[in-house]
Image (cartoon, rainbow, N blue to C red):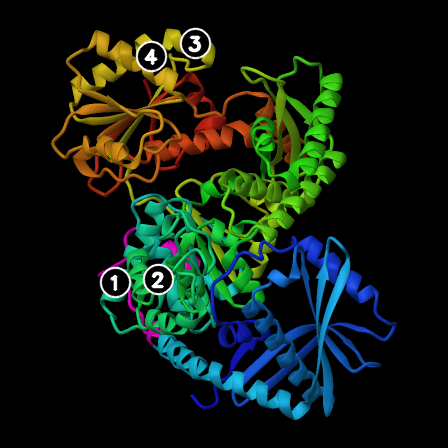
């Protein structure tokens, strides 16, 4: 133990030891990252020629290594500067924020004095107003001995915690090295998957793993990473999922893995979205409004210490601990992300623009392994993360009730928006339902940035005012502006859709649509030691590698199915067309097929259609011609209880047909083994709708990858078909039938994209 060292960044050290008082978000959001970088550059540009920017500093105290990067040092003045950009009234900066800033510059000062053998140094906090381009400089002179004492005091506080963490890490690695598989043997295919994940962790190569449902993918990916963690010096493992059921499976898998070795000190944290974990949604995040924000940092050390004693910090346990210590559950979970070994959460925590886990990883230089469950969802989710839109009619409604200080900025933005509409009407014609722009409109963006600045200043001046409509537009505008900064011709489409209100002047919805999220995601993959993307449907792998920005050395494994071809009868109904023009004619043969199959083998079936309209017409005909058949149907906008009622109809001894929409809540992620589901009808290829947006995607993807139609329509559609059909066979004992209803399923190109273990027959 005595020889082990602990490394911490200056910022992380100060946030741990020097934060006190209220949680207070009123002075934020601060300037954007781009504005902050520009502000730092402006300050540095005003200094003399000998001024040193971004000074790398490091030092040790006992077995604690402290490192960081000070903003600037002027040798002529012997002045070390910490620059903080802001907007609004500096007097509103909370005292505990300024105390934290002073702590940082003092730690940097101690490191500088030791490294350069200085007896004293002048320290300066430079607050730079990005709107007025004005500096407020606060200066203090310190003897080196004073700074060394300050440094030692904060290091001692941190070491009390760090020594516990070193002991925890040592014991964690010791016990994980001896981790045994929780079951008597691997399921068929599970060992292949586990070995591939272990190899990925060993080499650092990303892995795309196509692994069929039913082999235990969650345990099969977590076990090898936990086993590899000690030897590969992994600081954290992130298990990321698109949906809540995936996160629940991960937590259950951890419990299973730890059953045989309950003394393993593995801290597992479940991250929950802010809106789902907020105890006081009607209050703002500061001490004068929310009781859990008042004195938050004074109570955080005890709450953090208590949480660190629990191996499983799931949503319920974390909430209980937070409320016991009278702190906010959401911000306690954010803190515990720093101190947990395995973090389970949504994709956005690592992959989106302001991802918490990605930010912590880069800031602390963690060595992490990332698992992305049901990774076929990541393309669409990532496109959503890096897309943005603004609605002019919603903005106009906000403009009418805007506070006086915002009126002129809002008027300018509306004028630019109207001018953009007029310009696109002239180019595309006033009746065009969809307009594509070459670039984000510069004049509009400038007006938007001015509106953002005005709102930021207003919120800084009126911190107690809660206006949900204004806040919503503000965050939408900030996001739009940040996406515009990422714009490049290949990865994005800029378009606008006309909006015609019942009364008043027409407007538009302006969109920045991400087509290829490869560039921002590539940085995420680079920052991880290893990444495994796994799903039952990742074919063809080149499609996912291209769109997600996976590096050229990414490994691919297609895990053989544990199921036998004789378990599943797959019949292609090639005499029926489900194309849009043929749908009315398809209803009679589809309903006859469903009725005949049910008569031959009564039981529970799912019937999937491409839209609610198609579903409702088929359901009406079935009820009319076969009124004795028990049927139930997915409804638009079902809540959680209604979805559960739909699934509860699939009883082990039940009989009936559930009608559902392909790509919806019931076509993936649900488990109906045995007699709960014995067959499915898929009356569509699942192809996305042909519309102007998708046609633009096809054109762009064709130019980039040469397969515009396949990348836009065929691959996403067949993925949904295979996912839906995958509901039927869930265990090695299941028997079932799948009817693929459309003549196009017989095409060689389509058949090649269906699972290799299916034995395809005609209908």
Give the mark nearer the N terminus: 1 vs 3. 1
Q: Which of labels 4 and 1 is toward the front?
A: 4
Who is closer to the viewer here, 682 or 517?
517
Q: Give the extent of the magenta segment.
A: 175-197
x then y, percent, for residue 640:
29, 37
Q: CA distance from mark 1 to mark 3?
A: 52 Å
Is residue 560 positioned above or below 225 on the image? above
Element assignment for label 4: helix
Is there a contact, CB below 8 Å, between mark 1 and mark 2? yes
Q: Give the crowd class for mark 3: few <14, some 14-19, many >=20 residues within 10 Å.
A: few
Is there a contact, CB below 8 Å, between mark 4 and mark 2? no
Who is closer to the viewer here, 288 or 611?
288
Left of 689 or right of it: where is 640? left
Which quadrant is the N terminus positioned in? bottom left
Q: Give the crowd class for mark 1: few <14, some 14-19, many >=20 residues within 10 Å.
A: some
Is residue 135 positioned above or below 427 on the image? below
Quickly name the residue at label 1: 182
Res 582 label:
3
| Residue drawn at the location 65% of the way across and 76% of the way down | 105
Element assignment for label 3: helix
Is residue 244 among the parts visible in the rendering? yes
* Residue extending furthest toward the right: 49
Element assignment for label 1: loop
Quickly name the residue at label 2: 223
Quickly name the residue at label 4: 617
């Amino acid at each position: 133990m005595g020889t082990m060292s602990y490394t911490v960044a200056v910022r992380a050290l100060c946030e741990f030891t020097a934060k006190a008082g209220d949680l207070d978000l009123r002075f934020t959001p601060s300037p954007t990252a781009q504005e902050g970088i520009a502000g730092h550059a402006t300050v540095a540009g005003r200094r003399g020629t000998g001024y040193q920017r971004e000074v790398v500093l490091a030092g040790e105290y006992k077995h604690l290594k402290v490192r960081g990067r000070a903003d600037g040092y002027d040798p002529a003045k012997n002045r070390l500067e910490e620059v903080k950009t802001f907007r609004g009234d500096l007097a509103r900066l909370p005292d505990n924020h300024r105390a934290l800033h002073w702590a940082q510059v003092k730690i940097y000062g101690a490191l500088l004095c030791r490294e350069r053998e200085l007896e004293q140094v002048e320290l300066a906090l430079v607050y730079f107003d990005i709107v007025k381009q004005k500096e407020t400089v606060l200066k203090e002179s310190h003897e080196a001995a004073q700074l060394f004492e300050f440094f030692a005091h904060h290091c001692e506080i941190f070491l009390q915690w760090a020594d516990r963490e070193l002991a925890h890490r040592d014991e964690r690695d010791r016990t994980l090295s001896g981790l045994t598989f929780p079951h008597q043997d691997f399921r068929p295919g599970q060992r292949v998957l586990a070995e591939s994940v272990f190899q990925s962790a060993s080499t650092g190569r990303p892995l795309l793993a196509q692994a069929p449902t039913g082999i235990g993918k969650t345990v099969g990916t977590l076990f090898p990473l936990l086993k590899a963690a000690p030897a590969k010096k992994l600081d954290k493992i992130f298990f990321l999922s698109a949906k809540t059921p995936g996160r629940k499976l991960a937590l259950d898998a951890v419990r299973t893995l730890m059953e045989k070795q309950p003394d393993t000190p593995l801290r597992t944290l479940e991250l929950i979205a802010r809106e789902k974990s907020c105890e006081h949604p009607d209050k703002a995040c500061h001490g004068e409004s929310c009781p859990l924000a008042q004195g938050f940092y004074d109570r955080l050390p005890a709450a953090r210490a208590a949480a660190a004693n629990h191996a499983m910090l799931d949503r319920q346990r974390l909430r209980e601990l937070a409320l016991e210590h009278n702190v906010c559950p959401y911000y306690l979970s954010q803190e515990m992300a720093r101190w947990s070994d395995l973090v389970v959460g949504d994709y956005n925590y690592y992959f989106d623009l302001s991802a918490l886990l990605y930010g912590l990883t880069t800031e602390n230089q963690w060595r992490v392994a990332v698992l992305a469950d049901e990774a076929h969802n990541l393309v669409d989710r990532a496109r959503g993360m890096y897309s943005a839109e603004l609605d002019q009619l919603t903005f106009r409604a906000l403009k009418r009730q805007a506070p006086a200080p915002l009126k002129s900025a809002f008027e300018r933005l509306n004028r630019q928006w109207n001018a953009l509409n007029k310009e696109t009407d002239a180019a595309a014609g006033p009746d065009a339902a969809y307009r594509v722009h070459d670039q984000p409109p510069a004049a509009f963006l400038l007006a938007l940035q001015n509106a953002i600045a005005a709102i930021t200043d207003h919120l800084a001046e009126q911190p107690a005012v809660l206006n949900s409509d204004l806040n919503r537009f503000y965050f939408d505008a900030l996001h739009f502006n940040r996406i515009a900064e990422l714009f490049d011709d290949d990865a994005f489409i800029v378009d606008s859709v006309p909006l015609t209100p019942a009364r008043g002047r027409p407007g538009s919805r302006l969109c920045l649509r991400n087509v290829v999220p490869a560039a921002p995601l590539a940085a995420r993959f680079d920052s991880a030691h290893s990444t495994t993307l796994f799903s039952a449907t990742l074919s063809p792998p080149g499609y996912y590698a291209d769109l997600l920005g996976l590096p050229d050395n990414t490994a691919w494994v297609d895990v053989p199915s544990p199921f036998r071809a004789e378990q599943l009868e797959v019949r292609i109904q090639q005499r029926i067309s489900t194309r849009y023009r043929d749908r009315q004619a398809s209803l009679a043969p589809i309903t006859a097929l469903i009725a005949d199959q049910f008569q031959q083998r009564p039981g529970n079936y799912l019937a999937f259609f491409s839209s609610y309209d198609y579903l409702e017409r088929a359901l009406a005909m079935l009820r009319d011609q076969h009124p004795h058949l028990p049927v139930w149907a997915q409804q638009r906008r079902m809540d959680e209880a209604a979805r559960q009622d739909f699934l509860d109809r699939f009883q082990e001894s039940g009989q009936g047909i559930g009608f559902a929409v392909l790509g919806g809540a019931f076509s993936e992620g649900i488990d109906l083994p045995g007699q709960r589901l014995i067959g499915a009808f898929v009356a569509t290829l699942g192809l996305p709708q042909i519309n102007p947006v998708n046609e633009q995607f096809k054109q762009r993807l064709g130019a980039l990858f040469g397969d515009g139609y396949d990348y836009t329509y065929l691959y996403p559609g067949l993925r949904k078909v295979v996912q839906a059909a995958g509901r039927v066979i869930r265990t090695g004992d299941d028997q079932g039938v799948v009817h693929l209803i459309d003549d196009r399923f017989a095409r060689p190109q389509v058949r090649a994209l269906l699972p290799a273990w299916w034995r395809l027959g005609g209908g």
